[in-house]
Every structure is written in C-alpha cells, then in structure tokens.
Amino acid sequence: MRIAIDIDDTIANTNQLLEVYADKYDKLYKEGHGIIDKNCYKFNGMYDWDENDRLHFFETYMVEVLENVEVKEHVPDVIKRLRQDGHYIIFITTRDGDYIEDCYKLTETWLNKNNIEYDLIIAGDKRKSDYADLLDFDLFIDDNVKNCTKVSEKGVEVLLFDTVYNRDNHDFKRVDNWLEIYDYITSKNN
C-alpha cells in the first residue's frame, strides 16, 4: 500500500508548539490578550491579531517551531513497522515556503532527527491532491478537512487525524492516534 501522510498535526504536535510561541509573540508584540478562539485553524481568529501580525509571527518563529516540534506518540515505531510490512511511505507537507527557505531540507532534517523512516518527501506544495494521481496513493492521512476532501475526490481512501479544528467534520474515518492507524491498516491487509 502507498500511504501519503501529512506532517504538521498528523505526525507532529505543531499547533501545540505554535501556541507556546504565539503566546510569547502576543506578550512581546501585542497587548497580551492571549487566545480568543482555540478552535481556529492556522491562527486565523485564534488571537486578536490582524493579518500583518499573523504574517510577522510566522516570519519570526515558523522555522524555529518546525525544527523543534515534538513527534506524536508512537509515530517512529508505527512508521517503521508499516515499512517493514511492505508499505511505501510518502510524507507530503504544505509547510509554507513563504516563511521557510528550504522546506524540503527542513522536513528531511526533522524526520531524520526524530528517526522517522520514509520513502519519499514532498514539501512546500499546497496541492496535495495533485500528487494522488501522480504517485498513486492508496491511503491519505491528514488533519486538514480541505486536503482530505480534495484527495478523496481523486478516489483515494482518507483518514482524518483528529484535532480541535476539524471535530465538526464527519465525512471521513477519524483517527486519534498512530496505534489506531496501524491497527486499521493491518486489518485492511488481512
């Protein structure tokens, strides 16, 4: 099976670390009101910031966050087991090139530092669904409903990784952790 996997908030606790840095930014550059709406995606409306504040925050901290974000529990072991079981692992991330000089290198370095095995990395491209046909995904795992929708429209099975900002969506099979993902994939292959 060819499995395409998002990185941020799918195998990495990115929003969790972004919130730490956003609180720091909010105190340093704003009036320090903190989080207004925790359920927002990508800080659009999460803080009392305008678009310039949001852009300045990402320019200031994004690389540091992505270099230091922690891996979700069980990811390295599950990915290793999936590869040992014969699955082809593709990491596909839209990490924004507007804030990162070399998305591919940053992603490759982070995966290697965290002992996460892979067969292919696609980084910095927002059109994940374009790769569904090109790379012939069998399964796509992401936390972003929009990405899941577009990839599923290509006929690819999708698993939606649970987050606070996607809980209203019930269009896809929802998964909460990587042991659950491993069991699901294993059950499909038996």
Image (cartoon, rainbow, N blue to C red):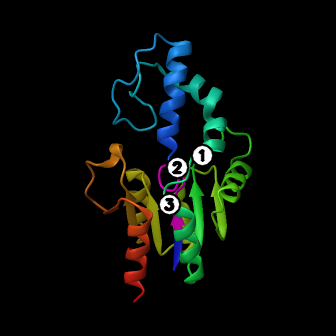
Residue tagged 2: 8
Residue 9 drawn in magenta:
yes
Closer mark to the observer between disc 3 and disc 1: 1
Instruction: Estimate the x, y position of residue 165 in percent, counting from the top left.
Output: 35, 43
Instruction: Estimate the x, y position of residue 100 in percent, counting from the top left.
Output: 68, 39
Residues shaded magenta = 4-12
Q: For the point 44% across and 31% down, which residue is it?
A: 43
Q: Taking 155 as reference, is 27 left or right? A: right
Residue tagged 1: 95
Q: For the point 38% across and 25% down, which residue is it?
A: 35
Binning the other alpha carbons within 10 Å of mark 3 as few (below 14), some (14 to 19) or many (20 upward) gives many
Marked residue nearer the N-terminal end (1 or 2): 2
Query: Label 2 is placed on what type of residue?
Result: Asp
Q: For the point 40% across and 15% down, which residue is it?
A: 33
Q: Secondary structure at mark 2?
A: loop
Instruction: Please say whether residue 42 is visible from this viewpoint.
Output: yes
Marked residue nearer the N-terminal end (3 or 1): 1
Instruction: Estimate the x, y position of residue 124 in percent, counting from the top left.
Output: 63, 49
* Inter-mark Cα distance, 3 to 1: 15 Å
Residue 129, disc: 3
Binning the other alpha carbons within 10 Å of mark 1 as few (below 14), some (14 to 19) or many (20 upward) gives many
Image quadrant in which you'd find residue 52 = top right
Query: Label 1 is placed on what type of residue?
Result: Arg
Q: Secondary structure at mark 3?
A: helix
Residue 86 drawn in magenta:
no
* Inter-mark Cα distance, 3 to 2: 17 Å
